[in-house]
Amino acid sequence: MPPMAKRTNEQWLSDLRADASRRETALADLRADIMYGLPYALRDWLSPNDPRFAALAEEVTQETLMRALNHLDSFEGRSQFTTWVHKIAARVALTELRRRHWKDVSLDSLLESGEGERTPRATADHEPEPEVTAEQADLLEHLQRMMMEELTAKQLRAMMAVGVKAMPLEEAARRLGMKRNALYKLLHDARLRLKRRLAREGLSAAELLAAFERR
């Protein structure tokens, strides 16, 4: 059983906007409900028995409470209030897990180990034909060569981290010593350079993606 008394959506909003004891009681109940749901929400990524889970759950719960309180006006009532809060908690938790995953990985190491490590998603269900695999490898090598030739050193590090290795934007920005908006512009300019290079060679991004969809 969830460790809290049930409230309607209207009661949650009213209590969380109230003064003093009503608000504190609602916050305590909401905190307990978030903690209760996190083991289920994170079951595919982190076991509750993992030594890291307790600290993560505490951090996620605090951040979720702050976000929920700051965005009460955006709750539209299309679901249960607690369902809405649990979705916030799940997003916060997964973002934090990704950040921690990349904490001790250097951007230089991504460049050193970048070639040949990304598996085309065409291989997810069936093995592609040998000729398709060879074509995909050639295209990937060609794309990596274009990146090396067209991008500045900083653009290349950013693209390898975010575009190739899927490092969270916030973590890549921290590693590069940039603001998020500045990194976003850096990536935007890098993509424009690559698009122009592709156009000069008579290729398009759509054609590259299509090659990795074939099986």
Image: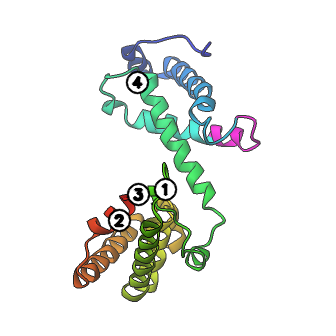
Q: Indicate the position of residue 209 as horizontal and vertical percent values.
A: 34, 63
* Distance from the alpha carbon under mark 2 to that under mark 4: 54 Å
Q: Nearer the viewer, mark 1 or mark 3?
A: 3
Give the structural element (helix, strand or loop) at label 1: helix
Of the image marks 2 and 4, the number of the one nearer the N terminus = 4
Of the image marks 1 and 4, the number of the one nearer the N terminus = 4
Q: Which residue is mark 2?
A: 211
Give the amino acid type for the residue marked by disc 2 in the picture.
Answer: Ala
Q: Indicate the position of residue 162 as horizontal and vertical percent values.
A: 46, 66
* Distance from the alpha carbon under mark 1 to that under mark 3: 8 Å
Give the amino acid type for the residue marked by disc 4 in the picture.
Answer: Arg
Q: Indicate the position of residue 194 as horizontal and vertical percent values.
A: 31, 78
Q: Nearer the viewer, mark 3 or mark 2?
A: 3
Q: Which residue is mark 1?
A: 123
Q: Which mark is residue 71?
A: none
Magenta extent: 48-58
